[in-house]
Amino acid sequence: MAAQYPALQVVLALLAAPVCLILRRPNAAWAVATVITWISLALALSLLGRVWETGVILYPMGDWAAPWGIEYQIDTVNAFMLVIVTLIGSVVMPFARASVEAEIEEERIYLFYCMYLLNLAGLLGIAITGDVFNLFVFLEISSLSSYVMISLGRDKRALTAAYRYLVIGTIGATFYIIGVGMMYMTTGSLNMADLAAILPAVADSRTVLVALGFLTVGLGLKLALFPLHLWLPNAYAYAPSAVTVFLAATGTKVAVYAFIRIFFTVFGGVEIFTAGVIPQILAVLAALAMIGASAVAIYQTDVKRLLAYSSIAQIGYMVLGISMVTVTGLAGTIVHLFNHAIMKGGLFMAMGCILFKIGAVQLDQFEGLGKRMPVTMAAFVAGGFSLIGVPLTVGFVSKWYLVQAALEKGWWLAVAAILASSLLAVIYIWRVVEVAYFRPPPKGSAEVSEAPLSMLVPLWILIGASYYFGIDATQTLDIAFAAAETLFAPPL
Amino acid sequence: MEFLGLLNYWIVVVLMMTGFYIVIAHNNLVKKIVGLNIFQVSVFVFYITMAKVKGGTAPILAEGIEIYSNPLPHVLILTAIVVGVATTALGLALVVRIHDAYGTIEDDEIEARENEL
């Protein structure tokens, strides 16, 4: 049974999606989705445990031997990704019940859970697969379902946000398969490990260079790398709260993972990345994202949009870590994948609670919210500290290692960019705090109570985790460093 | 001869750029989806072209068949076509909903209305 875990990891969610469709009842669909997500978390944890003890797991799908068949290759990096995705999913599900009931029409709720499970299956598939074309298929499963979920938002701008994301996302995915096709032309293989072995011999050909360009831009669109991020703010701002939490915490992270996989595993043996100008280009874009997006965040009046811009800045940190091409830098990126997932998940959950009670997340409606919803706002402030990178939070841990990696390389400008971006984060978090705590509630506003416990508990689990793993970061750092070292190890 | 030999690839490039241009330049949401389709079709042609082996037949196990075209890209493209159909369907469904909500499917008019909100 345990040998089949890699397949079950993806297949369970994929099969449960149509079950939700058949059940039709909102509560039944929610129950199925929750149980499946929790089982997936258990599977992911057991896979991570096995990888940690015995090393890479290879799982040929349907027993077709690689490189012809599709092979799942699980090492520390993607086992960690699986845990991040399922962990966030597991915390989101209890939160989603009340939140979705409030934000999506009742007859569409079961469709939401169906899409959520498809999205989960797609994200897990991207993380687990060792085949570049299979990755494309999962990428599209997760993208298509996320377009649908975004379009379920109450605001009619959700529709246009979903449409624009669909157009940009499809261009990104198509760029990605063009790149894959060009690699296939020169190597005749789609298996990542196999490609890594063949590519160095043909790395001089223009086709491979062009393939790398297409892959970079394609995945850059998916992970919202500045300046390819234009789809993200509206998509996050107008999607239903539970969707925003899940997508913000997992969607772009998995795309970052795919980016790392292509660059460090598939192109691992090729000089063009380690010696070329690509790292410098990425570093500059990352720095622009960190400072530019944070600066734009300051001027937002919709707090969900504000957090969305902050996400673009945080993706900048991850790309900065990648661009350093050192173990410390990459470990910083990988640990930030986890850290940002829990803190941004928590912050968007706080938005969900406020949306649930107040019905809007415009900044002027936050007046006096510190008194009206003390538990939620306290969580927001705590999460905000983490976003800024105050010591004892996970945000500090990530930034500490990224700064260290930048110092190792002597990249003083990168250190300056990290500090500048953190200072900008202080400003945009403070703007919200100021309105919520230092302005009196508007006259005539009803005594607003707190959101239900089913939403507050998941919120505080994520915020609590962002302090727990900030105070004692040894576990996450051990995994991140081991993962980064695997990526730099020569291919098998 | 070289140009003719690479004719399919030239078609791929022309289709790809046409589709991409339509997606970027057109204001009408349905036309954008059509452009996206052309863009994707160019990739299908690209995959199928690279699989062709000169003088090769279909990959069947039978006597007298020695050179055959690579079947794998065809299979990949079947999958990609399915993905493309799903994307088109979803895109058009969204356009219908957008039309209901905004009363127009012209991008600039929608943007003007969004800015009023």
Image (spheres, coloured by chain):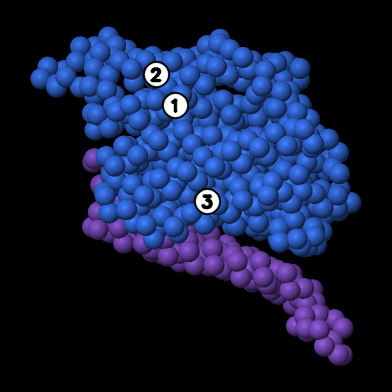
Chain colours: A blue, B purple
Q: Quadrant of residue B64?
A: bottom right
User: Residue A20: where, in percent of width, then height?
Assistant: 41, 55
Q: Is residue A8 left or right of residue B7?
A: left
Tag 2: residue type?
A: Ala
Q: Nearer the viewer, residue A207 or A33?
A: A33
In the picture of the structure, the residue carrying the numbered disc 2 is: A379
Q: Is residue A183 visible?
A: no
For the view shown, which residue lies furthest in the bottom direction? B64
Question: According to the image, label 1 marks what residue?
Answer: A346
User: Who comes first in sequence, dot 1 or dot 2?
Assistant: 1
Q: Residue at x 67, y 57 (%)?
A: A133
Seen at 48% across and 61% down, the residue is: B87
Where residue A365 is drawn, which disc sits there?
none
Residue extending furthest right?
A201
SS at badge 3: helix
Circles 1 and 2, Cβ within 8 Å, touching? The answer is: yes
Looking at the rendered image, the disc whose residue lies closer to the viewer, 3 or 1, is: 3
Q: Is residue A417 left or right of residue A197?
A: left
Where does residue A434 sit, x and y in percent of width and height?
Answer: 32, 12
Name the amino acid type tagged 3. Answer: Ala
Judging from the image, mark 3 belongs to the subunit labelled A
Quote the CA–CA distance across marks 2 and 3: 31 Å
Tag 1, which secondary structure?
helix
The image shows residue A330, relative to residue A472, as above or below, that is below
Image coordinates of residue A349 in percent, x first then y, are 39, 29
Q: Nearer the viewer, residue B6 or A318?
A: A318
